[in-house]
Structures are given as C-alpha cells and as structure tokens.
Amino acid sequence: MYNFKTMKYTSVSCVLFFCLNILIPSCLGYNVVSFGARGDGRTDSTSAFLRAWSAACHSTSQPNVYIPRGTYLVRTLNLNGPCKRQIEFQIDGTLVAPVNYNAIGNSEFWIMFYKVSGLNVYGGTINAKGHGYWSCRKGGGTCPQGARSIQFMWCNNVLLKGLTSLDSQRVHIGIGYSSNVRVENVKIAAPSGSPNTDGIHVQNSRGITIYDSIIKTEMTVYPLALPPNMWIEKVDVALTWHQTLTFFSCRTCSIGSLGHSLNEDGVANVTVANSVFTKTQNGVRIKSWARPSGGFAKNLMFKNLVMRNVGNPIFIDQNYCPHNSSGVKVSDVTFKNVKGTSSTQAAMKFDCSPSNPCTGIKLHDIKLTYNDRLRRPAFAYCKNARGSHAGKVFPKSCI
C-alpha cells in the first residue's frame, strides 16, 4: 500500500527550503508560468501546462508541476505517463474551462491523468463552466457527450487531496481501471440546474478510499460501478439549492448500475461509514438492471449514517428499468446504526428479484422516522428479501 505519510513529508521538506520557481525548476517543480502560462483567466494556457507536465514526467530530479495563484484558462489536458518518478501536481490557483462548452465537451475528459503511477494532486480549484452545456441538454439540442472534469485512468498509488471541483459538465471526479487511490478533503459542487451530474464515479478499480469530503450536486454522486475493496468515510452529501433530490448513482450513494452488461465483474467489500445525507433523493442504494447478468454485489457494509429528510434512506432495487428478472446476485449486505428522517414513508425498501432473491441482509440498530406533517409512521417494504435483524429496528423489520 502506498505510504501517504512519506508523500506528505516530501512536500513539507520542499517548503522548508523556501524554494520558489519562477524561471527554473526547483523543489516546487516545473512552474507552468515558466512555460508560458498566464493566470489572467483569459489567455489559453493549455500548451504551457502540457509542456510543464512533459518536463516533470521525464525528470529524475524534481518531477513536480506547480500552478501558482491565479486563474488559468485551459482546454483538454491529457497528462500521460508513465513517468520516470513519483510525480506531484500542486495547484495553488484555479483552472477554468472555456465558456464555449464545445471546447471540452467533445472530449470525454477535461483533465485526464493516464497511466501514471505514484501521483499526488494537491489543492486548488477546477471550474468546468458547465452552465452552457446544461442549457443545451435541457433545451433538447444537439449537444456533445460532455466531459468529466478530472479523470484518473489506469493509475496506481494516487492521492487526490484538497481539490475543489465546480460545475462539471457531467462527472466531477472519475476513477477507472486504477488501484490504491485515496480521495481526501475534496469539495464538489454543482447547482440544481445541472442535469445528471455525478460527483465521484468509480469503475473497475481496487483499493479506493474516499474520506472527509463534501459533495453537493443536483443528481448523482457515486455510481460505484464495479469497484471491489472500497471505503467511503466522513462524507457529507447535501442538496442545498432547493428542497428536492440528490446524491449518488441516480441521486444517492449508489452501487450500480449493476447488470447493465451480461458479462461484468462484481462488486465486493465496499464500506460506507460515518457519513451524512441531507435532502437527497435516495440514501444508500444498491441498484441492478432487471436483465440477465453474471454480476454480483456482496460483502457490503453501510454503518454509522445520518439521514436528514432523505428519500428511500435504505434501498435495494433489483428491478431498475425492468426487462425480466435480475441476474445480479445481492448477498451479505449490512445496514448498521442508520438513523434520521425519511422524506418517503417506505424508509426501508428491499425490492428484490423473484428468481434471484437478496440474501444475507442484516439490519442492526436502525431508527428512521417519516418526516410527514400528518404524522404517519414510516414502514419497511420487502419483496424476495431474506436476512436477519438485531437490536432496535424501526420501522419494524419486514425481513
């Protein structure tokens, strides 16, 4: 496992030498200003960023890229590896996309790290200026596919810390085909007018940790498509701009969409702990398509969670966009110490497949009340779900 303490010490040691990099590389690395970038928010600095990255990636002495204070306009950045040494990407300023959404919208990614092993991305703000793209989507026009703001593809041993991501066109942070990635102290925000904007999308990756972060988006936050060995802790997910929906996959902390393909890997060993959900459409959800599949979801733990006026706080749905029975096997899922208020009367809902029932569902110390002016009680709904309960469970368990 990557030694994050060592990485942190290396960064601090540079500061102690009081190194500055204006014209030449130093312990702060390759300053993008040295390569022609201008922090005025108007000058296209894409080429300067790419040149700074190439120099750092090929360096064996100071393999770091430094973005000082200022606002830097950049188009699509393909930051490719492998690099000769562990590399640091330090952002003290703000990166902004062009106002014309086509400038990045026709690319799948805005900022993409590809095949980089041993990567630290620290601090700063990235703003994808997604408003124009959202307007195109809502207007029903011919729109590009939209870009993910920052993507890690085929990367190993990565730390993303202290980043603020604003107004992504489609996905704020993407992690694909990567391992040992820690996302820490990030802030993600998009307003209520952003259609289907994911916060963090993880796919086909291992050893992913998301810690101590704040996510505020209009719809989706974590479609955790197919990642084994994942830990999410101290994440505060909220909808602050209006009174209805949002959070992970399809507006919740969702593991899905599973079963989208006939042959796909399964999801195993995922933990979501010590987190708060506020006014989201769903709380913690496992979602699979109702179609044949060899996929599975097992050994999942959701614990120490607070729900604040959340729709469907606990939800397993094997009948998403039904065609016939789901082939995805859902088993050994634990919900422990989940408390708060539900904006729907069915505070717990287990809608499982008749041909492939959910098994090993465990409820332990659940207290969810219906936030209803008429004071109607919350209830649990079960269909083809099997398991057990312990401690105090409210609403009364139907398992």
Image: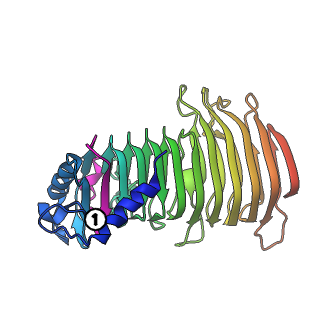
Give the residue displayed 38% in from the left and 53% down from the top.
Answer: 140
Image-based side of 43 in relation to 140, left or right? left
Q: How is the image coloured?
A: rainbow
Residue 193 located within the stretch drawn in magenta: no
Question: To which quarter of the image does residue 43 belong?
Answer: bottom left
Question: How far across and how far down the image is residue 90, in percent?
Answer: 31, 62
Q: Nearer the viewer, residue 328 or 389?
A: 389
Q: Nearer the viewer, residue 50 or 117?
A: 117
Q: Which residues are magenta?
A: 82-107
Q: Nearer the viewer, residue 101 or 63?
A: 63
**Mark 1: amino acid:** Val
Check disc 1 and report the residue beneath it. Answer: 96
Give the residue displayed 63% in from the left and 36% down from the top.
Answer: 322
Q: Nearer the viewer, residue 111 or 291?
A: 111
Question: To which quarter of the image does residue 240 belong?
Answer: bottom right
Image-based side of 63 in relation to 333, left or right? left
Give the residue displayed 54% in from the left and 38% down from the top.
Answer: 226
